[in-house]
Image (cartoon, rainbow, N blue to C red):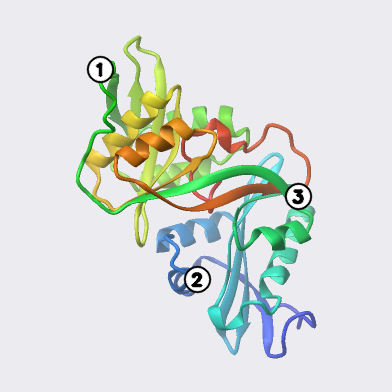
Amino acid sequence: MPDEPDTSLPAGLQTVELNEADAGRCLALSIEAGWNQSLQDWQLMLDYGTGFGIESADTLVGTAVIVPYPPEIAWISMVLVAKEWRRKGLGTELMRRCISSCNSLNLVPFLDATEDGIPVYLSLGFTGSKSISRFTRQDSRPGSAGIENRRRSRVGITADWQEINRTDLKTFRANRASILESLVGRTSGVTLLVSDSGHGAGAVTGRPGIRFYHIGPLLASSDTHAIELVETILNKTSGPFTIDVPDVHYGFQESLRILGFERQRSFRRMHLGDVKGVADPDGYYAIAGPEYG
């Protein structure tokens, strides 16, 4: 439903609220931008969260989404503007809508900013310095990270998303159970790594996107366990692949390069407000993606 006309936007534009029925229109924008989100991603975000759009004569030219992660934060993502409408203030207006909605819910906004988006978010008061690098691998063939003489752990498959959720809640420190359940439901199962001692050493899941199979979130107790989980995904799933790795895990990033991954771009985790210890990307070997945190 259209909102009241917004005088901060160019003439002929109006802001609207988006819902799951708008997923197809949103997908067209993310495909134009070269992003990886699928129709299922859009449907999930718009079903569980709140979407804002900007229309020009019933054509969707801008989007933004808020996904609540109670009890303290909300995730802002999918801030997209059609090419012909960029640098006209649409992205800033969408962000203002998102921030206002987060404030009304008493939730602190978080996001993963692209390099182009960082100046906009800084101007709105966002802070944050944790960096994340995106790696991609075009080759679908399985491979080895070349770590010689390592003691391999037992890797198993399970569809028990609750195991991922329990581990994620301890690390992320915000509740995104509904999101994780949906992501796990799209795969043939969650890959769990079990150490030789029988204690859990890590877990990973992934999902198919428009351009790549996205690996993450990935939690592990060591670089070796993390790379074993990635190798398991490569052996069981068709590529090409993408993975978003916090830069603190430089050793793991080097192992990914040996596996044939190449660094493509970076993100910065940012927030508007102070919530200590929540949504720290460094606790993960791979995040769920900038759309989910």
Report if the CB atoms under discs 3 and 1 are less than 8 Å apart. Answer: no
Q: Which residue is mark 2?
A: 26
Q: Find the residue positioned furthest to the top.
A: 197
- Vertical placement of residue 121 versus 293, above or below: below
Task: Give the SS element for disc 3.
Answer: loop
State the residue in front, 123 or 257.
257
In the drawing, does residue 220 fall left or right of residue 52? left
First of labels 1, 2 by sequence position = 2
Report if the CB atoms under discs 2 and 3 are less than 8 Å apart. Answer: no
Q: Quadrant of residue 221?
A: top left
Q: CA distance from mark 2 to mark 3?
A: 25 Å
Q: Point out the frontmost of discs 3 and 1.
A: 1
First of labels 3, 1 by sequence position = 1
Q: For label 3, count other residues whose C-alpha is less than 10 Å away and answer few (under 14), some (14-19) or many (20+).
A: some
State the residue in front, 289 or 87.
87
The x, y position of residue 12, in whole percent, is 68, 90
What amino acid is at disc 3?
A: Leu
Q: Point out the frontmost of discs 2 and 3.
A: 3
The x, y position of residue 246, in whole percent, is 53, 39
State the residue in front, 232 or 141.
141
Q: Which residue is mark 1?
A: 149
Tell me what residue is drawn at x 77 percent, y 61 percent: 123
Q: CA distance from mark 1 to mark 2?
A: 48 Å
Q: Quadrant of residue 128?
A: top right
- Vertical placement of residue 234 versus 117, above or below: above
In the drawing, does residue 288 fall left or right of residue 123? left
The number of discs equals 3
The x, y position of residue 223, in whole percent, is 41, 26
Q: Which residue is mark 3?
A: 272
Task: Give the SS element for disc 1.
Answer: loop
Q: Is residue 27 visible?
A: yes
What amino acid is at disc 1?
A: Asn
